Image (cartoon, helix red, strand yellow):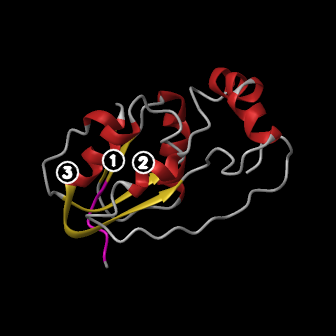
Amino acid sequence: TKITSWVGIEPNTNFEEHINETKSKYHMGFPTSLKWYQGEHLDVPEASVDHVVITLVLCSVDDVDKVLREAKRALKVGGSIVFMEHVADWTPGLRRQLQDTVFGSFFYTFGDGCNFRETWHHIDKLKGDFDVNYTFAQAPEIWPISP
């Protein structure tokens, strides 16, 4: 599939320089635009995009379900949503307790509002409308914050 245009939605203006450098480095041969707002309020017409890619953002939005509803609203019939997210440890234990308490506060403060979340529960709600397939990738072990 040929890319005809790219629209980026980014709530964190601290990434502007990096995004512009990346666009320049890879000489994208199609129009690009970047909009600075939360994913809960996508300013794109209904059924107007072929694919939605969500990377490392659901941890820092106010309303995960609303972001997913907006992505679904913007998507054309037959389109796809692809995620790459870091999530809370899915197994109970000390690591998860530390993520929910000590390290959660640290990441929220120094990670631009990042929260450890059980993101898969929100994505599972899409199962009636999409084929949902998970591929889990284990990050390098940095106990107590992995995975």
- Depth check, front residue: 47 or 65: 65
Q: CA distance from mark 2 to mark 1?
A: 8 Å
Q: Position of residue 19 (x, y in %)?
A: 50, 44
Secondary-structure class at tag 1 = helix
Instruction: Specify the quadrant that holds the N terminus.
Output: bottom left
Count neighbours of disc 2 (C-alpha within 10 A) and say few if under 14, some if 14 to 19, many if 20 or more: some
Q: Position of residue 3 (x, y in %)?
A: 31, 69
Q: Earlier in the sequence, mark 3 or mark 1?
A: 1
CB under 8 Å between discs 2 and 1? yes
Badge nearest the viewer, 3 or 2: 2
Q: CA distance from mark 3 to mark 2?
A: 16 Å
- Depth check, front residue: 109 or 98: 98
Q: CA distance from mark 3 to mark 1?
A: 9 Å
Q: How many marks?
A: 3
Q: Is residue 50 magenta?
A: no
Secondary-structure class at tag 2 = helix
For label 2, the residue is: 122
For label 1, the residue is: 68
Q: Residue at x 67, y 64 (%)?
A: 137
Q: Residue at x 72, y 23 (%)?
A: 106
* Tag 1: amino acid: Leu
What stretch of residues is rendered in magenta? 2-6
